[in-house]
Amino acid sequence: MNLEDITTIKSILSQPQKIVIIPHKNPDGDAIGSCLGLLGFLKGKGLEATIISPNDYPKFLKWMPGSDAVLNFEKENSQSKKILEEATVIFTLDFNDLSRTGQLEAFLKDKKADFIMIDHHQQPGNYARVAYSDVSMSSTCEMVYNFIEYLGELNSMTKAIATNLYTGIMTDTGSFKYRSTSSRTHRVVADLIDNGAENMMIHQNIYDNNAPARLHLLGVALSNMVILSEYNTAYITLTQEELDAHDYKKGDTEGFVNYGLTLEGIIFAVIFIENREEGIIKISFRSVGDFSVNEFARNHFNGGGHDNAAGGRSEISIEETIEQFKTILKAYKSQLNP
Ligand code: 5GP
Ligand code: MN
């Protein structure tokens, strides 16, 4: 953020406002963590603020401090709409385009309010009065920490804010191992621990709370894995039947795609997950090195994200999607054999 942005934010937040904070659809740890961290900060300043999520989020995030107050636009629809109508300031966190908010997009497009974007995805849209967008950042949570620092208010950091921001940095960096994890990220994380984030408890709450059915589903995913050695690529499929047979709940497949990258030599990993209710195949793409899955998802699967982690979708059957994917791969043979 530049000086002008900081001055604008200070002036906006110095007046009474009705603030709404919005994460992307199917929010992950970084989206929820950044919203809850920012909420804690704004409430600490005596401001009125509410988080409205486009839809539900996984149970493994529901222990996070303040999470019971998150409104679900799908479930608490009339209450959410009323709060949105009255909103004077809208923070949009962890996404680059209003289309990432699903059904909420229609309400946000024509909404008269001061939009403030905090985000680290590529190709940011230009709907915001203040856009704090930085694709080099590990996570939106790290950016919310910076945001508080820019306002000169790090002394108002609480244990709850620190816990929420730590959680999002941890989940978005794959526990501090992805390329975007900088020495600065570690300094921020150290400060969050000093301010009360209990790192071991947070890791356990997120990663060590599996139901047996989820691990069995992982077993199915791993045995479904196909390796395309000539493209240094591995992909996994999960059909709706396989999900149903394992008591699938939102978030259960989080992280499955990464197993492909643990194979020696594999630089591109993909998971195709059938979602019959939405009539789509949800796809996650991951890479190591210079192969941009953001470009791949944008160009071929109506998606996007980051260079090494992106998502997309397909509206044909899972079998047809795989065939299409394999055809597209041919054009990337040299890029996938660096
Ligand atoms: P995931 O594969 O875990 O759903 O998402 C990986 C990254 O890509 C996240 O940063 C997520 O926000 C982004 N992403 C996931 N799906 C989409 C999509 O459909 N469109 C865009 N633009 N980004 C996505
Ligand atoms: Mn993120």
Image: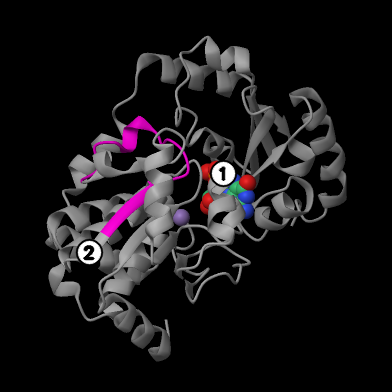
308 to 118, vertically: above or below: above
Residue at 50% across, 29% down:
253
Numbered circle sitting on residue 221: none
Residue behind mark 1: 103
Q: Are marks 1 and 2 in contact (CB under 8 Å)?
A: no
Task: Report which quarter residue 43 is drawn in.
Answer: bottom left
Task: Tell me which numbered mark, 1 or 2, is placed earlier along the sequence.
Answer: 2
From the viewer's side, name the closer residue of 307 and 145.
145
Is 7 rendered above or below residue 163? Answer: below
Colouring of the image: one colour
What is the magenta range? 49-65
> For residue 281: magenta?
no
Amino acid type of the residue that numbered disc 2 sits on in the rendered structure = Phe
The image shows residue 132 at horizontal and vertical percentages of: 46, 74
In which quadrant is the N terminus drawn? bottom left
Tell me if 293 is positioned left or right of 74 in this view.
right
Q: Residue at x 32, y 44 (%)?
A: 70
Give the quadrant of the C terminus: bottom right
Residue to which mark 2 is pinned: 41
- SS class of the residue under badge 1? helix
- For badge 1, the amino acid type reads Gln
Q: Is residue 58 magenta?
A: yes
